[in-house]
Image (spheres, rainbow, N blue to C red):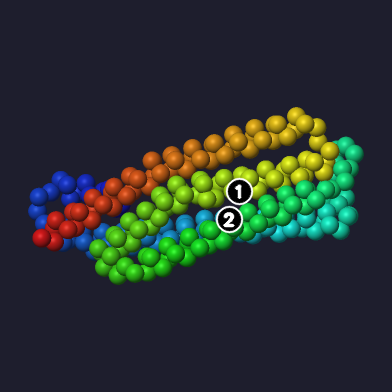
Amino acid sequence: MEFSEIKMIWDSQNQEPLYAMNENALHSIVQRRNQETNRCLARCFALEIGVGLLCVVVMFVYAGVLVSGNQQWVIKPWGNTVTPTGWDLLGLLVAGAIWAYYAAYMYRSRKQQQKRVELFDSSLRGDLDRALSQTDFQIKMTQDIVWWGLVPVWVAVTLWLVVLFHLKGAPAWVYVLMIAVALGALVVVVSGKQRAITNRYEPRRRELESLRSKLADTAR
């Protein structure tokens, strides 16, 4: 039985004893949902942090290859090999720094939220508040990550591709196509984030707030 199902039962009754019978069941559901949310967040943040750190390594490896002067094992040009410039090296270093920032941003955000949810007790009300805190965190992260995560990452990826295409001796139209594709991908991802807020997180928050309000009413 999920949150919405218990709420439907409550809304169809006027007697408080039904709440007493279902309090333990509701608490179990809230705890289970909290555990599922926490596992999902742990996996998602671990993936994002891991990708960020991996990209840092890739950017710095490419930069190291350019400094060493032996780029053939990394770069396979479709035309004449272009001699790397200081701007190529700078672009890779900046891209690596952005990816490092992204990994640190995700790690810091996750740790701060873990500290916040630890403050709630293990009662039904406490676990409902914990679930609301997790949902609010997901909404805020989904909103903030557009400017603090996705845009910087878009810049980092674009810098890397520009350097790579330059070293491959790519024609001008490739850069135009690459930027267009990257912008299109950014728009799609941002739209997906907004849909997640509208269709998933906000309904869940309303559901939790309704249950908390119902709990407060039955306690009177």
**x and y percentages locating residue 29 in the rendered image:** 31, 59
Residue in view at x 47 percent, y 49 percent: 144
Residue in view at x 28 percent, y 49 percent: 207
**x and y percentages locating residue 102 in the rendered image:** 58, 55
Residue in view at x 19 percent, y 58 percent: 215
Q: Nearer the viewer, residue 215 or 49?
A: 49
Q: Which mark is residue 67?
A: none
Rendered position, 79 above or below 90: above
Q: Which mark is residue 102?
A: 2
Query: Regarding mark 2 in the picture, which secondary structure is present there?
Result: helix
> Which residue bears the numbered disc 1?
153
Determine whether, in the image, residue 203 is placed left or right of residue 71.
Answer: left
Which quadrant would residue 174 be assigned to in this image?
top right
Residue sitting farthest toward the top = 173
**x and y percentages locating residue 146 in the rendered image:** 51, 45
Determine whether, in the image, residue 22 is placed left or right of residue 193.
Answer: left
Say if residue 21 shows up in the picture: yes
Do the residues under discs 2 and 1 have CB atoms within 8 angstroms? yes
**x and y percentages locating residue 44 in the rendered image:** 52, 55
Say if residue 17 shows up in the picture: no
Residue in view at x 41 percent, y 51 percent: 140
Residue type at the position of mark 2: Tyr
Residue type at the position of mark 1: Val
Quarter of the image where the C terminus is located:
bottom left
Rendered position, 157 above or below 123: above
Determine whether, in the image, residue 4 is placed left or right of residue 177.
Answer: left
Counting residues from the N terminus, which is met first, the one under dot 2 or under dot 1?
2
